[in-house]
Amino acid sequence: MKILVCVKQVPDMESKFKIDSSSKWYDQSDLVYKINEYDEYAAEEAVRLKEKISDAQLTVLSIGPERVKDVIRKVLAMGADRGVHILDNEEYLKDPFQKASIIAEYAKSENFDVIFTGLQSQDRGSAQVAPLLAGMLDYAFVSTIVSFEYNEGYAALERELEGGLRAKVKAKLPVVLACQLGLNTPRYPTLPNIMKAKRKELKTVNVDELLKVEPLVETEKVYFPERKAGGIVLEGKADEMADELIKILKDKTQVVK
Amino acid sequence: MKALLIGEYKQGKLEESTYELVGFAKQFGIDNVMFLVAKDDVDLKYDSKVYIADADKYKEYNPDIHTKLIEEVAEKENPDYIIFSHSSYGWDMAFRLAVKLKVAPISEVIGYNEGTFVVPCCNSKFRRDVKPKTQKAVITLQGGAFAPVSEGTPQIEKIDAEGIEPSVEFIDYEMPPKTGVDLTKAEIIVSVGRGVGKKENIELEKELAQTLGAEIGASRPVVDSEWLDQSYQVGTTGQTVAPKLYIACGISGAIQHLAGMKKSGFVVAINKDKDAPIGEIADVFVVADVNEFVPILTKKLKSA
Ligand SMILES: Cc1cc2nc3c(=O)[nH]c(=O)nc-3n(C[C@H](O)[C@H](O)[C@H](O)COP(=O)(O)OP(=O)(O)OC[C@H]3O[C@@H](n4cnc5c(N)ncnc54)[C@H](O)[C@@H]3O)c2cc1C
Ligand SMILES: Nc1ncnc2c1ncn2[C@@H]1O[C@H](COP(=O)(O)O)[C@@H](O)[C@H]1O
């Protein structure tokens, strides 16, 4: 069985964000990067599947600049067999259709049986790359996976629906699965595994070899949302802010007396 | 301008979000027809044409067959936009359909202005204005972003699809375990987010809640980390609440959280990051470390 997991490197969402000079995205300097939260669950599930099946091979793929090798190495240390880095210094300027087509172009000759992805990236958050990829490869697609089990020839899945309701579904292989938060408990790579990962194959492919399509969507601008009109901001000493808050609550709500 | 709206039907009922799709089209003066997989007795208040496929025959969830049916309707109606909810039902069809039709996919739309769509990014820290580069587009609308419209009697046309071998099969629904907390009736909710740092710190919010006679709520990561059980979760995949007072402690204010609590009467946010998106709906934004501020607030409320 051949398994692929697609992981994205994103900034820590608690970073201080600035909008870049073109107003098309955030400024990428001075940020701390890590693996997209959703993709960590996808990676863990992929590693578990690989460990269960004797002849399975797990590939981890990421598109982005040199620094995204860090997240590839992390997933190699979690247990993936080989890494593919698609070098693209302008990943952030591409639309989801282009990103999906880059992955599809790479994946089409590999014939993966199961492709794990995150439900969405924390920064772009389009939730599109996975279903677009499935559409391009003509694979089955199921989103918002909170439980996964492999049985001969098919995947037994649970999806999380709105309001916490779940649905059990069965999907034929080959399939693209977009993983939701809480699917499993991702492991921490151990030191020996981190060392071992350094010796695993990590191939770099230039994006120009794989990108063959124009974008379908154009970003006009990126901006901060407005604060609530009339909203009050309290800053300063905790003690004084608490007094002020209690006064406001007594004034404006009927529930604090 | 014409739209094909994809209604949603779950557990034998029309989903309210369907009316938000109608609201969107009406708000921007877009002609519209609807597609829906439902049973015969569906209660739909809609003043235009609706193509209905039988839910007994095609199941409420069956992305391959539903997509095929939608394609057939799209061929007849030739819409500029095909509009889904940004939901578990929409995700499994909308973007694959965009690939098939070779049109621009635009997701999680929260605003619209003459062909430009507003979408959030970076966990709602930013907004993005985006434009399709194709004449037509497949779009998904964020729940709660547009006011619902439900009125009228639809003209129904039944439709069928033949000869499709589905790749995904629906088996069954599973209800979330009922563990008791019903937040929908709470007057005050003190809600805990990842910003509290660790499970033990939630004691501070519990004490504040007790002092105020409030219930405890939580954001999703708090539940995923098993600091509190699922029944406390507020948001699209948790409960939808509308207390008189909502105190968000260390919650950033992602769209999926806001969707579950933005009808609250008065919102207080306690967050160390002044730019956190919860500021968009907070009546009072306290810039502070929750673990330091909450005990002080509790103490003062107790002695007041
Ligand atoms: C399909 C789908 C459904 C979802 N459903 C839900 C849902 O139902 N409910 C839900 O909540 N989420 C849901 N989410 C997840 C949502 O997108 C966010 O990831 C989540 O709401 C973030 O939770 P948070 O605000 O607690 O954590 P974070 O986003 O990590 O925010 C933590 C906040 O705490 C602040 N902070 C950190 N330390 C401190 C400190 N010491 N003092 C004060 N402030 C501090 C930070 O500034 C930050 O703003 C869903 C996502 C998807 C894709
Ligand atoms: N640059 C990237 N490299 C690898 N995988 C990606 C990349 N961007 C998105 N993905 C995958 O697609 C999923 C959805 O991303 P998005 O459509 O941006 O919300 C992510 O969770 C990843 O699994």
Image (cartoon, rainbow, N blue to C red):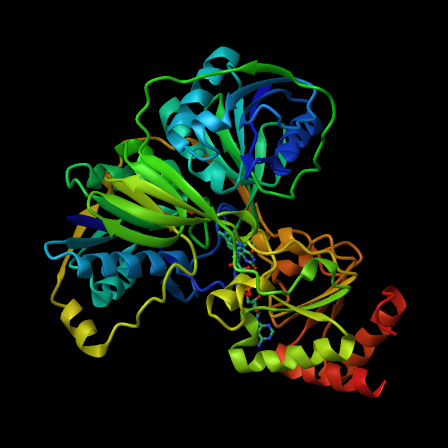
Viewed as shown, does residue B194 lie left or right of A242?
left
Q: Is residue A159 above or below residue B27?
A: below
Viewed as shown, does residue B39 lie left or right of A43?
right
Residue A64 seen anywhere in this rendered image of the structure? no
Viewed as shown, does residue B27 lie left or right of A178?
right
Foreground residue, A70 or B267?
Answer: B267
Residue A250, x across and y down, in percent: 87, 71
Q: Residue at x 19, y 46 (%)?
A: A152
Q: Residue at x 49, y 21 (%)?
A: B135
Q: Is residue B6 above or below residue B176?
A: above
Q: Residue at x 74, y 57 (%)?
A: B264
Foreground residue, B213 or A249?
Answer: B213
Of the 4 image quadrants, the one containing the C terminus of chain B is bottom right
Residue A150 seen anywhere in this rendered image of the structure? yes
- Find the residue positioned furthest to the top: B76
| Quarter where residue B246 is shown | bottom right
Residue B27, x across and y down, in percent: 70, 29
Residue B13, x across and y down, in percent: 60, 36
Of the 4 image quadrants, the one containing the N terminus of chain B is top right
Residue B212, x across and y down, in percent: 77, 75
Q: Residue at x 18, y 52 (%)?
A: A204
| Quarter where residue B66 is shown | top left
